[in-house]
């Protein structure tokens, strides 16, 4: 039986892999509820140090002894069944919960909004949280990325609303049972878990079925997958957004700029103002529309919601500018699916404004590389120079014969350079004023941005 939030106050909850983006956010919120937090991680980090400063007791290793005395153990999908702490928990009879189930407990006493979708859920969650803050609502939130303005990915607010990013990667988002939900889009991804597009669609249908009947679902009418889902939900209020005439929240008069975008918002046929974003791309206008429509349906007023969206400055690793040196601009982005690469490079091309677009791409997982090799090649070909690193395995075991060469061999201008030092040296040495250099992927490719900026400073002085 799942514990209640009240039953955990004063108890000890242990988080295996506490330094991860999702787990650290839960630990931060648990601490704010006077829950004693312990945890473990394989590496030390600024995130771990911050949690220690808040009172968490953290071990930089995974050992069975770490869970002794815990009342509850929380683990993420990245944790192997052979993890010694997980095994010890089971042997000692300590209750264990997945990260999703633990998040469901933490938001069980709130009006919860779960933000799901193959793409855009981190940005949309962040936009909704910031928009609600602008309304004075002070929502709680747990998001998979850091909101730039606040420098945090989790917060326990004083308001009634809890915004949670709902990760579909392992199907566990059915645990949330939210009052309301957002579905930005539905597309085949996480092919290690979902072997077919139909499996993904089924997972989202199960997720939608968990939304409370007196709540609602906000969906993107421009996306075929999200629209197909909404058409099947006869007993749930569904709110649509997009550019179509029949959308509950319609966008028109769209303007896409190098580092921003704008659109008029029409709610149920009436203009309610203009979305002016400081982040680029048509996709971000749709993300903002999702947040705006949800806020309006929750009863908040348009001017305050729009003000929040207008001051939103993005999230970490989403078209994040790392530096500009001698006219060379360096950006880092989390895009790791062909669709995400498409929209990111379209925005980067506008930002380049005639300059060259240089992409350093790191594929994420062997299974995704096999499934989308041709689509990766097609999407990356939008750039002027494409360097592809070796695959970032995450928790996957290698697949015989699968390397990043599967992508570059399908391209006319793709370079396969697995060595990080060789890549950064090559890109720094060949950089020209007005270039946009973008590090792209969900793995440790993000570490290259600061190195490239430093190298450009040394080169150009």
Image (tube, rainbow, N blue to C red):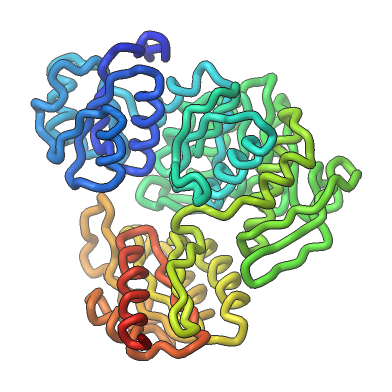
User: Is residue 18 visible to us here?
Assistant: yes
Judge left or right: residue 358 versus residue 300.
left
Residue 340 in percent (x, y) is at 52, 62
Judge left or right: residue 281 versus residue 206.
right
Judge left or right: residue 234 versus residue 47.
right
Question: Residue 193, located in which quarter of the rendered image?
Answer: top left
145 w.r.t. 337: above or below: above
Tally the numbered discs. 0
What residue sits 45% from the left and 63% below the top?
333
What residue sits 27% from the left and 34% below the top?
53
Judge left or right: residue 271 versus residue 101.
right
Name the image quarter holding the N terminus. Answer: top left
What residue sits 35% from the left and 17% below the top?
34
438 w.r.t. 111: above or below: below
Question: Residue 24, located in which quarter of the rendered image?
Answer: top left
Residue 135 in percent (x, y) is at 69, 34
User: Which residue appears farthest toward the right when viewing the image?
Assistant: 270
What residue sits 60% from the left and 42% below the top?
130
User: Which residue appears farthest toward the front when viewing the image?
Assistant: 461
């Amino acid at each position: 039986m799942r514990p209640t939030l009240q039953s955990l106050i004063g108890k000890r909850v242990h988080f295996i892999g506490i330094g991860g983006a999702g787990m650290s956010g839960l630990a931060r919120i648990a601490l704010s509820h006077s829950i004693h937090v312990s945890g473990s991680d394989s590496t030390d980090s600024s995130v771990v140090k911050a949690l220690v400063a808040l009172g968490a007791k953290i071990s930089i290793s995974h050992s069975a002894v770490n869970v002794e005395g815990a009342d509850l153990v929380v683990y993420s999908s990245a944790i192997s069944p052979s993890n010694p702490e997980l095994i010890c928990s089971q042997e000692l009879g300590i209750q264990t919960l997945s990260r999703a189930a633990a998040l469901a407990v933490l938001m069980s006493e709130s009006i919860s909004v779960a933000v799901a979708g193959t793409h855009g859920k981190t940005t949309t969650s962040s936009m909704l949280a910031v928009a609600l803050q602008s309304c004075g609502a002070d929502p709680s939130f747990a998001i998979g990325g850091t909101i730039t303005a606040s420098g945090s990915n989790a917060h326990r607010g004083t308001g009634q609303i809890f915004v949670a990013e709902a990760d579909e990667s392992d199907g566990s988002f059915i645990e949330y049972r939210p009052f309301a939900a957002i579905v930005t889009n539905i597309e085949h991804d996480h092919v290690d878990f979902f072997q077919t597009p139909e499996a993904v669609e089924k997972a989202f249908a199960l997720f939608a079925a968990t939304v409370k009947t007196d709540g609602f679902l906000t969906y993107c009418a421009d996306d075929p997958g999200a629209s197909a889902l909404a058409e099947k939900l006869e007993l749930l209020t569904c709110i649509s957004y997009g550019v179509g005439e029949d959308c509950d929240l319609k966008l028109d008069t769209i303007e896409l700029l190098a580092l921003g975008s704008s659109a008029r918002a029409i709610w149920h046929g009436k203009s309610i103002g203009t979305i002016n974003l400081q982040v680029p791309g048509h996709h971000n206008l749709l993300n903002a529309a999702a947040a705006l429509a949800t806020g309006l349906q929750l009863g908040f007023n348009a001017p305050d919601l729009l003000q929040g969206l207008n001051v939103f400055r993005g999230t970490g690793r989403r078209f994040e500018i790392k530096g500009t040196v001698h006219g060379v601009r360096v950006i880092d982005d989390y895009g790791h699916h062909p669709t995400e690469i498409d929209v990111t490079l379209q925005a980067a091309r506008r930002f380049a404004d005639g300059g060259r677009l240089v992409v350093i791409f790191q594929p994420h997982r062997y299974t995704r590389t096999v499934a989308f090799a041709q689509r990766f090649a097609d999407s990356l070909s939008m750039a002027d120079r494409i360097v592809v690193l070796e695959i970032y395995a995450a928790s996957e075991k290698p697949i015989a014969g699968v390397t990043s060469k599967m992508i570059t061999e399908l391209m006319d201008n793709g370079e396969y350079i697995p060595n990080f030092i060789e890549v950064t040296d090559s890109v720094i040495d060949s950089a020209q004023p007005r270039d946009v250099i973008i590090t792209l992927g969900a793995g440790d490719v993000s570490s290259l941005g600061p190195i490239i900026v430093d190298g450009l400073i040394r080169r150009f002085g």
